[in-house]
Amino acid sequence: MVLPKYTLIIPIYDEEETIAALYGRVSALMDRLDAPSELILVNDGSRDRSLQLIRELHDRDPRVCYLSLARNFGHQIAVTAGLNYVRGRVIVILDADLQDPPELIPAMLEKWRQGYQVVYAQRTQRRKEGWFKRLTAFVFYRLLKQLADVDIPTDTGDFCLMDRQVVDLLNAMPERNRYIRGLRSWVGFSQTAIQFERDPRIAGDVKYTFHKSLGLAINGLVSFSKVPLRISTYVGLFAALVAIVMMLLTFYWRIAYPASPLTGLTIIVVAIFFLGAVQLLSIGILGEYIGRIYEEVKNRPLYTLSEVAGFEQQKFSVPQEHFDRGHD
């Protein structure tokens, strides 16, 4: 059996309207590659005809392999499942909506041949996206870059190329709350960017709603930064300082202005609400970190599979020539 040199991973969630166009562009690219390749489609608990269409592609094209998760586990876990099954030397992750253009992959491969082990796509423009989406994304990426313990590039998603050595390290990480773009920065190695303008979806509805995007943003911040914990400490110290100042002012007003309304119920209510808000904020931040500890100690599998096709059951040893960076 000839092992693929290139592996493309695409998570699928309710993408029946895009699968045909996606396969057309990706298969055309695979035909032009200089070595055997495979396409791993990960069905993330789709509720439409996506799985049926994936089966048909697999029956028609032996290069198409697929995993079907037993339920919707989320984008990051679907990508992780694909990474667990790769057989190639070079792995590319992209989305099914074709906002990540497959035609950019040859440029990524050229960077890999130059010695880079991670090549990530960096957006320079988001076409036909609303101002709110663009603004929140702009703020989040720059906030994360300032707060994170590692250097996570701005305006980058999961669209990237990774060397097998990097993927093996990602697969060895046991954590449950996964933020792929942060993990690939954390492992290090030589990394570079390919810039592109992101196109709108070709069909279907946006799968990353504001709620999901917010959850991913919180996950990224909590997973790669301890600053939120320090913020709660700083806010607590600030609240204590304000409380001391208010106490001194109350004594002053009570002595100098006995009839002042500031020494009555109003200032007490304001102080209670302020301190209560500080406490709830601190508890919320602690809860985010404790919740992740709770998820880790349960030690459940990251995902469950209902269907797997296109993969050999035995493990393969990769011959040395398969690691050649040049053309085969």
Image (cartoon, rainbow, N blue to C red):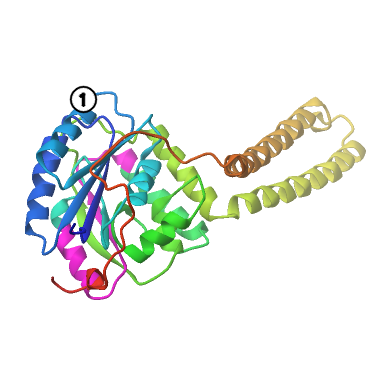
Determine if the magenta segment contains residue 113. yes
Can you tell which quarter of the image residue 18 is in? top left
The total number of labels drawn is 1
- Mark 1 residue element: loop
Q: Which residue is mark 1?
A: 49
Q: What residue is shown at x 34% (from left), y 39% (from top)?
A: 132
Can you tell which quarter of the image residue 210 is in? top left
Can you tell which quarter of the image residue 268 is in? top right
Check the picture and name the quadrant holding the C terminus.
Answer: bottom left
Please give left or right for residue 328 compared with residue 302 in the image.
left
Please give left or right for residue 112 compared with residue 304 in the image.
left
Check the picture and name the quadrant holding the N terminus.
Answer: bottom left
Determine if the magenta segment contains residue 151. no
Q: What residue is shown at x 68% (from left), y 52% (from top)?
A: 234
> Taking the image as drawn, is residue 153 in sight?
no
Question: Which is more toward the observer, 18 or 27?
Answer: 27
Horizontal and vertical percent for residue 110? Answer: 18, 69
Q: What residue is shown at x 48% (from left), y 63% (from top)?
A: 150
Q: Which residues are magenta?
A: 104-133
Question: Which is more toward the observer, 266 or 284?
Answer: 284
Horizontal and vertical percent for residue 277? Answer: 67, 35
Three-letter residue code for mark 1: Arg
Please give left or right for residue 37 compared with residue 228 in the image.
left
> Taking the image as drawn, is residue 312 in sight?
yes
Q: Residues within 10 Å of mark 1 (few under 14, many from 20)?
A: few
Question: Which is more toward the observer, 193 or 96?
Answer: 96
Q: What residue is shown at x 85% (from left), y 42% (from top)?
A: 247
Q: Is residue 9 above or below residue 160?
A: above
Horizontal and vertical percent for residue 134? Answer: 31, 44
